[in-house]
Amino acid sequence: MKGINSMKKNAQGFTLIELMIVVAIIGILAAIALPAYQDYVKRSKLTSLLTEANPYKTAIGICYQTDANIDLCDGGSNGIPAAEGNIASVTNGAITITVPAATDDKNIVLTPDTTNKSKVIWTIKGGTICVDAIDGCTAGT
């Protein structure tokens, strides 16, 4: 009989304080991980939108090299595709991207800088995240 009573004593489980410590640790980890995850999701959506603009950027670069006038580079003319999907408009070389409300509340405008005659440098305005892979990238307001 003595052996059964000692087994019951050893198998009592966790104390309330131990469970509370585990819950507190999980809460702290969640408080750190959730904002980082939300930022990651926002960055990936914005990067996807910027990738959608790549064919337009290429066509505008070719248009500028051909005509030497960025004002002639509009969507639907001079080899530049017409605006579709999240691309709201292409006017005078500037590409306006509509950002879904779940990602950000502002539109992104990719503006070509043609001061360097050998290449077009793109400036991002309107978004809150700047993608380093784009030459001349600056955070917008």
Image (cartoon, rainbow, N blue to C red):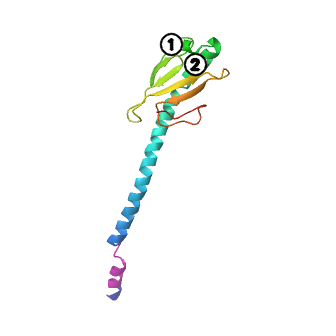
Question: Which residues are the magenta region?
Answer: 4-13
Q: Nearer the viewer, residue 1 or 125?
A: 125
Q: Nearer the viewer, residue 15 or 49?
A: 49
The image shows residue 14, relative to residue 95, as above or below, that is below
Q: CA distance from mark 2 to mark 1?
A: 11 Å
Which residue matches tag 2? 60
- Residue 36 location in percent, x, y? 46, 48
Q: Which residue is rendered at x = 52% and y = 21% of the image?
A: 94
Q: Which residue is rendered at x = 37% and y = 79% of the image?
A: 10
Mark 2: give few (<14), some (14-19) or many (20+) Cα within 10 Å.
many
- Residue 5 location in percent, x, y? 32, 84
Q: Secondary structure at mark 2?
A: helix
In the image, what residue type sits under mark 1? Gly
| 7 drawn magenta | yes
Which of label 2 and label 1 is nearer to you? 2
| Sequence-first tag of 2 and 1 | 2
- Residue 112 location in percent, x, y? 56, 23
Mark 1: give few (<14), some (14-19) or many (20+) Cα within 10 Å.
few
Which residue matches tag 1? 76
Q: In terms of image quadrants, where is residue 27?
A: bottom left
Residue 32 as seen in the image, left or right of residue 118:
left
Q: Residue furthest bottom?
A: 2
The image shows residue 53, relative to residue 7, as above or below, that is above
| 10 drawn magenta | yes
